[in-house]
Amino acid sequence: MYLIGDIGNSEIKICLVNSKKKIIKKINFDSKNISSKKIKNNFKFLNKHYSNINKILFCSVVPKIFKLIKHYLKTKTNTKCYEIKSLNLSSLLKIKIKYNQVGSDRIANSISLANPQKNFIIIDLGTATTFDVLIGKDYIGGIIAPGIKISLNTLSDNACLIPKIDLKKIRKVIGIDTKSAVRSGFFWGYVGLIDNIINLIKKETKKSFKIIITGGFSKLMKDTIKTKVIENKNITLNGLIKTLDLIK
């Protein structure tokens, strides 16, 4: 069996994968206020499986948490724990920009889709709003914009008359009160941002792309974006599973 994990700024996903590369157990937990005790409690589901794990692979954008998890796993198994950027990925993905400037989650996403016959724009609506451009197996770069939830929270934290607001789909553009005005600004603002960046990427590269959308707000946005998009919630985990073959 294999153990894979995605350590993000907001959430951590841990999966147990069988020899046929199918996820058989999965847990998610909050990245905030992480501690050794919290890691121990969340990893209890693996207690009967440690002796059967022969490959461990993570993608992490929070080095401190990866270090804690790696240390904990070292006490439970003799299997080496890898971070995706520590591997030679050239057979799966050609990274055409500075390697240390690409987040591990974005690398995993790109590996999941890399195909010499296809081009992709991967949009991740997570802690940040990111766009990654994949031409065949070449990762040529991307765009990072503010995340929706962080931007909403920052607005309410810094404007005393604006309350905490959950983003919802809104049909009308013109708001009739503070809540609907903010919802409109964020919903239609991000729809416009996404469509505009997609069009600018196409114009700059003179290529056509399939658009893949993922992350916490992907379901909310996918049907309103003018460009046809495909939602894929498991793209990061699929990229990790595909990369397991590089571990000998």
Image: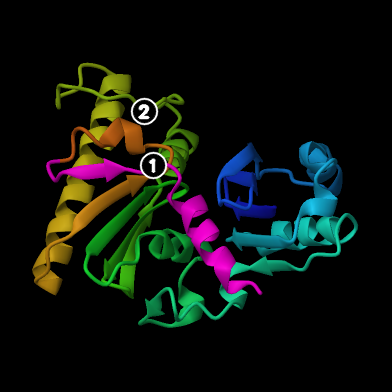
Residue 235's disc number: none
- Percent across and percent down for residue 173 are 15, 27
Residue at far top of view: 176
- Percent across and percent down for residue 94 are 38, 79
The residue under the point 46% across, 75% down is 101
Q: Considering depth in this image, is 243 or 110 the residue closer to the camera? A: 243
Horizontally, residue 17 falls left or right of residue 42, namely: left
- The kind of residue tagged 1 is Ile
Residue 167's disc number: 2
Asked whether the residues under the numbered discs 1 and 2 touch, taking CB atoms below 8 Å apart as contact, a structural biologist would say yes
- Residue position for label 1: 148
| SS assignment at label 2 | loop
Is residue 117 in the magenta section?
no
Q: Is residue 170 above or below residue 21?
A: above
- The kind of residue tagged 2 is Leu
The residue under the point 30% across, 29% down is 182
| SS assignment at label 1 | helix
> How far apart, in angstroms, are the residues tagged by discs 1 and 2?
9 Å
Span colored in magenta? 226-248
Of the numbered discs 1 and 2, the one sitting upstream in the chain is: 1
Residue at far front of view: 20
Q: Is residue 19 above or below residue 114?
A: above
